[in-house]
Amino acid sequence: MNEFLLILGMFLVTFGVRYLVLAFVSRITLPALVQRALRYVPAAVLSAIIAPAMLITEADGLDFSLRNAALIASLAAILISWRTKNLLLTIVVGMGVYLLWRVLV
């Protein structure tokens, strides 16, 4: 029962905070500068999630070496994405390079 109340409380807090912001913002017109800045939010959030996973290892902390399979796979995925613009190919190549690099290095 305590777990249910905990989950319900987390839901209410998360939903409440987001709903209040969306309810107020939908009633006003945002300045063009703010609207233009909000277009960069998804890329910034995605970068903030991916960069630590790519660069920080449990053993060494910040790792820019060739032993870092996540870094090598990320660079390969970035290259494939840039050249082909194919999401499925990017994922397959990135995961393949990651697994292969883990086995070989």
Image (cartoon, rainbow, N blue to C red):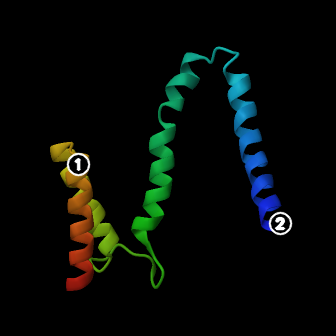
| In this picture, residue 72 sits left or right of residue 26 | left
Question: Of callouts 2 and 1, which one flags the residue occurring earlier in the amino acid sequence?
Answer: 2
Residue highlighted by disc 1: 81
Q: Amino acid at mark 2?
A: Met
> Does the image show residue 3?
yes
Residue occupying the far front of the picture: 1
Determine the residue positioned at 48% across, 41% down: 42
Q: Secondary structure at mark 2?
A: loop
Q: Secondary structure at mark 1?
A: helix
Residue 72 is tagged as none
> Does the image show residue 105?
no
Give the quadrant of the N terminus: bottom right
| In this picture, residue 49 sits left or right of residue 1 | left
Q: Nearer the viewer, residue 8 or 55?
A: 8
Crowdedness near tag 1: few (<14), some (14–19) or many (≥20) residues, C-alpha within 10 Å = some
Determine the residue positioned at 77% across, 40% down: 16
Residue highlighted by disc 2: 1
Determine the residue positioned at 16% across, 45% down: 84
The percent coordinates of residue 6 (x first, y second) are: 80, 61
Determine the residue positioned at 44% across, 43% down: 43
Q: Amino acid at mark 1?
A: Ser
